Amino acid sequence: MHTTFSDGVLSPEKLVKKARDAGLSAIAITDHDHVGAIDEASALGQQLGVTVLPGLELSVTLAGKDIHVLAYLFDHTDPTLLDYLAFFRGERLKRAERIVKKLNSINVPLKIDAVLEQAGIGAVGRPHIASALVVEGHVESFHEAFNRFIGVGGPAYETKFQMNPQEAFRLINKAGGLSFLAHPGRYLSEQELLELIKQGLDGIEVVHPSHSEPQREYYRGIVHHYFLLESGGSDFHGGRKNDDYVFGVHTVPLHVVETMRSRLFS
Ligand code: AMP
Ligand code: ZN
């Protein structure tokens, strides 16, 4: 799940309370390029009876494709990891400035300050730019912002700084954690998936709102075949159209977490 430390709408406190109200026993916070929510959420989770697992979502490139990697159960105070994350967030800011320049060049007079107001303390991303475009009246909806301007191949699209998958897996493993391919959906070939497994991927996010039942079965099969781990969740961001239908609905049983822990600590 995401918080205000990246492109989520809820603060860590509100998210943990929502999890408690929904009867969840454990959640993972997986902000993009940020671990700032974890301490506060864990402390509150302890009081409320919700285990908060340290998580993170990184972006990597494979064959020109933007792929997301989830990290779980790592040391979120690892200094090398924190250095990388600070660097990635700096690059995100530069990229937001490039996107704003492109928008200005096609007569969309958005200011970077409007974007930063949306981002607040969070790692700035395209969702913040989309929200700023809505607030400033340049588009009618979040989705229109992506479709007309900032989606892949759009006139104001800019790539993000991305490392290669192997580097990300190494970084996560060195911080004591496990790496999972986030919501692979349909956009990877089996060949590409095998390449990631060879490079050190630990598991696959099988359960995700965007995955159909046949897709879940397919990825579960790959997980078993290659002795990988399974993960899953709602990828909750808050504030978007379908978000209240995914929260606490797309879940995995607690033994998935126990299996992750035993892979790390056996
Ligand atoms: P960024 O990491 O800044 O490139 O932003 C990527 C995020 O933007 C994704 O995690 C999605 O939440 C969101 N996103 C990407 N493409 C779309 C789209 N076409 N419509 C709505 N949201 C999108
Ligand atoms: Zn996101």
Image (spheres, rainbow, N blue to C red):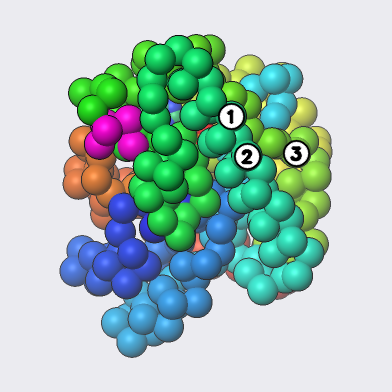
Residue at x-position 53% and y-position 25%:
101
Depicted 124 relative to depicted 55: above or below: above
- Residue 29 x/y as whole percent: 46, 60
- Along the viewing direction, whichever of 153 and 56 lies nearer the viewer: 153
Residue under pointer 1: 98
Residue at x-position 50% and y-position 77%:
39
Left or right: residue 83 versus residue 21 is: right
Depicted 17 relative to depicted 229: above or below: below
How packed is label 1: few (under 14 Cα within 10 Å), some, or many (20 or more)?
some
Residue at x-position 45% and y-position 60%:
121
Three-letter code, disc 2 = Lys
Q: Mark 3 vs mark 2: which is more N-terminal? A: 2
Residue under pointer 2: 94
- Along the viewing direction, whichever of 253 and 140 lies nearer the viewer: 140
- Residue 236 x/y as whole percent: 34, 48
Left or right: residue 116 versus residue 182 is: left
Label 1 beta carbon less than 8 Å to ligand 1:
no
The prevailing secondary structure element of the residues shown in magenta is: helix
How packed is label 2: few (under 14 Cα within 10 Å), some, or many (20 or more)?
some
Residue under pointer 3: 163
- Give the CA separation, mark 3 to mark 2: 16 Å
Quadrant of the drawing holding the C terminus: bottom right
Task: Report if the CB atoms under discs 1 and 2 are less than 8 Å apart.
Answer: yes
